[in-house]
Amino acid sequence: MPLVPALSALVEQLRNHPLGQILEGVRSSVNAGSTLADALNKYKHVFSPLFVSMVAAGESSGTLEYVLLRLAEMLEKRVHLVSKVKSAIAYPVMMVVVAVGVVVFLMSVVVPSITQIFLEMNRNLPWPTRLLIAASALLQTYFMLIAIVICAALFAASAWMKTKDGRFFVDRLKLKLPLFGTLFLKLEIARLARTLGTLLAGGVPILGALKIAKGVVQNSFITDALDSVRELVSKGDDLAGAVRRTGLFPPIVFHTLATGQISGNVEDGLLNIADMYDGEVELTAKTLTSLLEPAILLIMGAIIGFIVLAILLPIFEINQVL
């Protein structure tokens, strides 16, 4: 099917979707003599530089349909990988939120009404009970102040993380976190390798591919490393050597790149790296979830157990006296 009828079919298919109007504009531009890449580039809020560059390379090499299939595969795998990680982390996060809510409810509503009975009896209370009463009173008295301080701290931290230095610090810290640091690094490597491999396979030159691939990386610490790689390659260094000199990527990455350079097939090496790290990210996310769930349950059980113990101890003492 020629390009314009293909676009017309998509416009008709997406008639009630916002993307349909955009594709109608793309079709009009192509009908007027524009290339598909230039037509897509008019809608930069929808089509990324990666997408436009790949389409331009496909048009110039006469392999547009192959490039579009590559793009579809890459985007689908990226969405699938990110959704897997999010779904793996969502349950532990929900458990933490529920646990914090339960503890706050107990400390602000249930505990005060029960401990008030003990205070009216004027008896010497066990230290767990005294600690619980003090914590409950602190929460009741300064609840609004604590909430305001927490919200202000979160707002200040969010504003600071939007600055260049703040984002760089947080992104670097992410990669050094125990357990999670490895997950974040593997996720970024998988995204980067698949993007770079797809670009090279589509005929985009290495320097242009590195510049475009930098845009899909969400960690500023890694983007700085990519700037270093691009500078070294522009000066004549090979890709594997430049990647190795950053000291950031695992040995398997630059060894696979070196092998690809020898065989003249770097793009397949990059796509193989992406497939490998896709599987590792999914496995790591599942492993972390299996470790976090019992840990959260144990912590939650310990806190609630302490509250129950602090309430029951005075009752046991009263029963012994009676």
Image (spheres, rainbow, N blue to C red):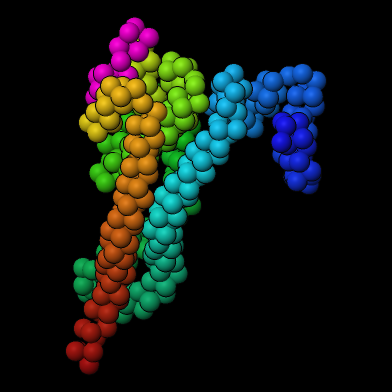
* Residue 22 % position (x, y): 74, 33
Q: Which quadrant does the C terminus fall into? A: bottom left
Question: In the image, is residue 280 above or below residue 250?
Answer: below
| The magenta stretch spans residue 235 | yes
* Residue 293 % position (x, y): 32, 62
At x 42%, y 59%, the residue is 91
* Boundaries of the magenta span: 232-250
At x 24%, y 28%, the residue is 255
> In terms of image quadrants, where is residue 173?
top left
Q: Which quadrant does the N terminus fall into? A: top right
* Residue 140 % position (x, y): 43, 60
* Residue 110 % position (x, y): 42, 73
Question: In the image, is residue 82 above or below residue 130?
Answer: above
- In the picture, measured across the screen, residue 4 lies left or right of residue 287, that is right
Q: Nearer the viewer, residue 88 or 199?
A: 199
Q: Nearer the viewer, residue 102 or 132?
A: 102
